[in-house]
């Protein structure tokens, strides 16, 4: 289904490239901002939907309402993961995103964990704080009042006690509250939290169901308000927002941010931090969506987000296509050959990630990312390895394309990985 | 012997490649000396890794307190040799994740201990071959450090069983990996590629390679600043709370020794005992002030580190060490800024930007 949409999108782009020869750099930067606004609008819309489903789960906990909330979380990841290409290079996003997508987390900060399957940061005082079970918490000399689980309180608990692994908010905190710990290591299966963890009173499992529900609702509310802020930053109707600053820059400088964001997400973050570390260390603890086993889609949509920027397109969640002057047009005007090479690289990279998705979603029997990276899983490892190699090759080609349009000083963040 | 042979190898190589006699182009002279340092340091590392393997054979034949002590000393020697090479971020080390096979760090969640315990609890024979297919975490120097220094592992009784199988397999595999790495740096085809990179418009081959060398030096300095000092000092987090477990080689109390060996390699690149260092290159370019400042900046880091009186893991939590720690961190930061803002421009090189800019 998604594959079909992608083919259609590509046809649209080929058409637009031909139709829009002679685009200006400023137009390309404006289209980048338009995509930014569309993708954050969609992230906001899907987060609001997630919030509604969480309200329904809390109001009436059941197998069905929990499943609907989990489905809504997965849908919310589709635009958000495509937005991450805006993170590197745009300070407004980079400084903000930790509250939404920080990982890996020491989930024992938030709720109960099975200690035999829990590996937290050494020296993390908050690693087993269990905010849901405790109305006060002593960290160092300070005693925190946790009685009222508000969005503001949760935000203040991030990096509690000086540890980055203390992530109290965002997609992964919500993911943990919907799925629970994945106790299967590199075997099949995701987290399996029962809906009864949200049943108030007698039927409650895991203890403190009312507080767990309050925590989940507060985390969802914070996610929505954070995304509303970012949507405004990219809005064409907003004044004095980030979009206005970006468009006021010299186009070369804005384009450097665009390309730096593409290369850094492809190379250092996605290929390096999110895939290579987990693969080479065979460590499911380093899996991105480790509770839900939705990692394959998160990776796929990260890569899709990078492609969106090159092609100047974005397929919105309602199916409409945002399209306009693209980096691809600028590159093609200077060198049709380079543009074709970049597009070929995107096709290969998306195919490698499509294979990861297909393998993880097949009915017979699926192989999720945490299984692929298991020791001795040669078939799975080959899929991840190929995705990494394709992203590395893609980044090199993006760098070459950047040079073609006069962006020389481009050195994507490798997150200190060598490939 | 090794040192004397090398100029002949390089000399012959250059002769074969181009019309190069004794007059190596000036811009390339630093590369030749730097390359000799890299090749020598690889050979030293290979020799020490082999000695460590031999020590493991004799220790495991009859585990005793003296033997364990010697194992620990051999580990320190190997680690020092590796730290002298850690700045080399190009060439054979980038293939097949060799760097992670030699040292996997950081490991904030102590996954290493779990992985090692899983192997020890298992029943499959532990060999260099089986280890080479296992997680990179259980290969190389970090895993050796756990076995040899962690109080939960470094007990003589434990070495009478599978723990010695693991130690033997690890030291054999590590010696093999380092030997291969050292051989690759002597490979003629590789050296040819190294000295004659594919040209780019407007940039000479010497500039490409000198840029790569300088970039690697800067990366090492930033790694010291951000990871080796910044992480245990807690500088990356909101509350700036120190965490000694985030120090490299905290189990062996070797964190500061690691940094000193990183620094020694950079000092040698600047002013080698023989050959042509960055200092002379700058002098020849009439950049005397920058040449002098390079030496001072490097010395400043060395002096600042000497003021830290405790192992890094303990020092970060000790009030009496804070001034020395902050001064060390500051001096490393000043060295990084100097490389970016003065050294690179003085050599006519442009360095890329990366994540650590703006910190």
Image (cartoon, rainbow, N blue to C red):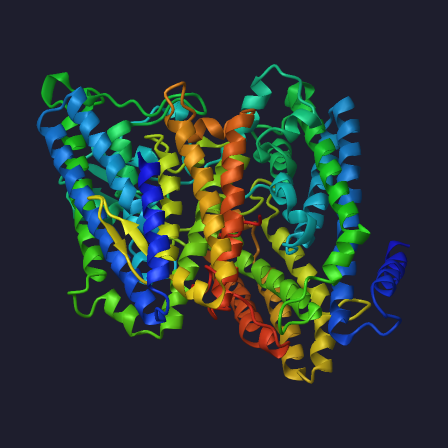
Q: Nearer the viewer, residue B225 or A123?
A: B225
Q: Nearer the viewer, residue A219 or A378?
A: A378
* A315 relative to A232 in the view: left or right: right
What residue do we see at 57% from left, 59% from top?
A: B219
Q: Nearer the viewer, residue A413 or A146?
A: A413
Rendering coords of residue A267 (x, y %): 48, 50
- Looking at this rendering, what residue extends furthest in the left direction? A59
User: Can the viewer see residue B227?
Assistant: yes
Rendering coords of residue A183 (x, y %): 38, 23
What residue do we see at 63% from left, 51% from top?
A: B258
Q: In which image quadrant can residue B240 be found?
A: bottom left
- Looking at this rendering, what residue extends furthest in the bottom direction? B286
- Looking at this rendering, what residue extends furthest in the top direction? B123
* B324 relative to A38 in the view: left or right: right
Q: In which image quadrant can residue B11 be found?
A: bottom right
User: Can the viewer see residue A94?
Assistant: no
Rendering coords of residue B295 (x, y %): 66, 73
What residue do we see at 24% from left, 47% from top?
A: A316
């Amino acid at each position: 289904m998604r594959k079909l949409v992608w083919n259609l999108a590509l046809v649209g782009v080929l058409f637009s490239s031909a139709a829009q020869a002679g685009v200006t750099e400023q137009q390309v930067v404006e289209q980048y901002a338009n995509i930014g606004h569309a993708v954050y609008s969609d992230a906001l819309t899907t987060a609001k939907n997630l919030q509604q489903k969480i309200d329904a789960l809390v109001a009436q906990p059941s197998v069905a309402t929990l499943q609907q909330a989990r489905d809504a979380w997965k849908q919310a990841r589709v635009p958000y993961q495509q937005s991450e290409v805006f993170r590197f290079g745009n300070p407004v996003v980079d400084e903000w995103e930790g509250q939404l997508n920080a990982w890996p987390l020491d989930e024992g900060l938030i709720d109960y964990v099975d200690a035999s399957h829990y590996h937290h940061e050494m020296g993390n005082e908050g690693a087993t704080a269990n905010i849901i079970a405790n109305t006060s918490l002593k960290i160092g000399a300070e005693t925190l009042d946790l009685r009222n689980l508000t969005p503001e309180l949760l935000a203040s608990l991030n990096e509690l006690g000086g540890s980055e692994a203390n992530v109290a908010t965002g997609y992964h905190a919500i993911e943990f509250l919907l799925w629970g710990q994945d106790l299967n290591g590199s075997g099949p299966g995701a987290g399996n939290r029962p809906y009864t963890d949200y049943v108030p009173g007698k039927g409650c499992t895991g203890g403190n169901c009312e507080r767990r529900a309050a925590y989940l609702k507060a985390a969802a509310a914070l996610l929505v308000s954070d995304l509303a802020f970012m949507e405004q930053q990219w809005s064409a109707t907003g004044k004095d927002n980030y979009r206005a600053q970006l468009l006021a820059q010299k186009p070369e400088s804005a384009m450097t941010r665009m390309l730096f964001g593409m290369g850094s997400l492809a190379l250092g973050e996605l290929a390096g931090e999110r895939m290579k570390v987990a693969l080479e260390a065979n460590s499911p603890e380093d899996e991105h969506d480790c509770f839900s086993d939705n990692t394959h889609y998160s990776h796929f949509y990260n890569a899709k987000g990078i492609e969106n920027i090159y092609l100047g397109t974005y397929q919105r969640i309602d199916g409409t296509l945002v399209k306009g002057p693209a980096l691809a047009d600028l590159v093609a005007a200077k060198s049709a050959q380079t543009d074709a090479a970049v597009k070929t690289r995107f096709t290969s990279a998306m195919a490698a990630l499509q294979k990861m998705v297909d393998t993880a979603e097949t009915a017979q029997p699926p192989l999720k990312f945490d299984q692929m990276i298991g020791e001795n899983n040669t078939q799975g490892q080959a899929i991840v390895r190929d995705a990494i190699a394709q992203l590395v090759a893609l980044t090199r080609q993006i760098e070459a394309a950047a040079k073609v349009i006069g962006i020389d000083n481009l050195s994507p963040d490798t997150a200190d990985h060598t490939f | 012997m090794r040192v004397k042979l090398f100029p002949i190898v390089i000399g012959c190589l250059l002769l074969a490649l181009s019309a190069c006699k004794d007059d190596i182009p000036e811009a390339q002279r630093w590369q030749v000396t730097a390359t000799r340092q890299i090749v020598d340091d690889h050979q030293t590392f290979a020799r020490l890794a082999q000695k460590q393997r031999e020590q493991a054979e004799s220790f495991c034949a009859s585990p005793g307190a003296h033997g364990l002590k010697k194992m620990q000393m051999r580990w320190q020697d190997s680690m020092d040799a590796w730290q002298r090479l850690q700045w080399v971020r190009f060439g054979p080390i980038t293939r097949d994740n060799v760097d992670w096979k030699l040292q996997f760090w950081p490991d904030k969640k102590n996954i290493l201990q779990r992985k090692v315990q899983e192997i020890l609890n298992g029943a499959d024979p532990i060999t260099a071959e089986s280890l080479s297919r296992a997680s990179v975490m259980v290969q190389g120097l970090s895993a050796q450090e756990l076995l040899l220094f962690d109080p939960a592992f470094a007990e003589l009784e434990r070495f009478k069983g599978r723990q010695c199988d693991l130690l033997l397999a690890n030291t054999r595999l590590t010696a093999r990996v380092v030997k291969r790495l050292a051989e690759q740096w002597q490979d003629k085809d590789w050296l040819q590629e190294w000295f004659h990179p594919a040209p780019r418009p407007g940039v000479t081959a010497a500039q490409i390679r000198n840029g790569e060398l300088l970039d690697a030096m800067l990366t090492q300095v930033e790694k010291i600043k951000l990871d080796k000092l910044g992480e245990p000092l807690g500088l990356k987090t909101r509350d700036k709370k120190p965490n000694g477990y985030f120090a490299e080689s905290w189990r062996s109390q070797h964190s500061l020794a690691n940094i000193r060996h990183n620094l020694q390699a950079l000092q040698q690149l600047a002013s080698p005992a023989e050959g042509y260092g960055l200092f002379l290159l700058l002098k020849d370019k009439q950049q005397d002030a920058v040449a002098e400042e390079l030496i001072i900046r490097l010395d400043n880091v060395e002096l600042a580190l000497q003021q830290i009186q405790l192992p890094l893991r303990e020092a970060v939590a000790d009030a009496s060490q804070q001034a020395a720690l902050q001064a060390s961190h500051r001096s490393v930061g000043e060295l990084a800024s100097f490389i970016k803002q003065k050294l690179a421009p003085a050599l006519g090189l442009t360095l890329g930007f990366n994540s650590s800019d703006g910190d």
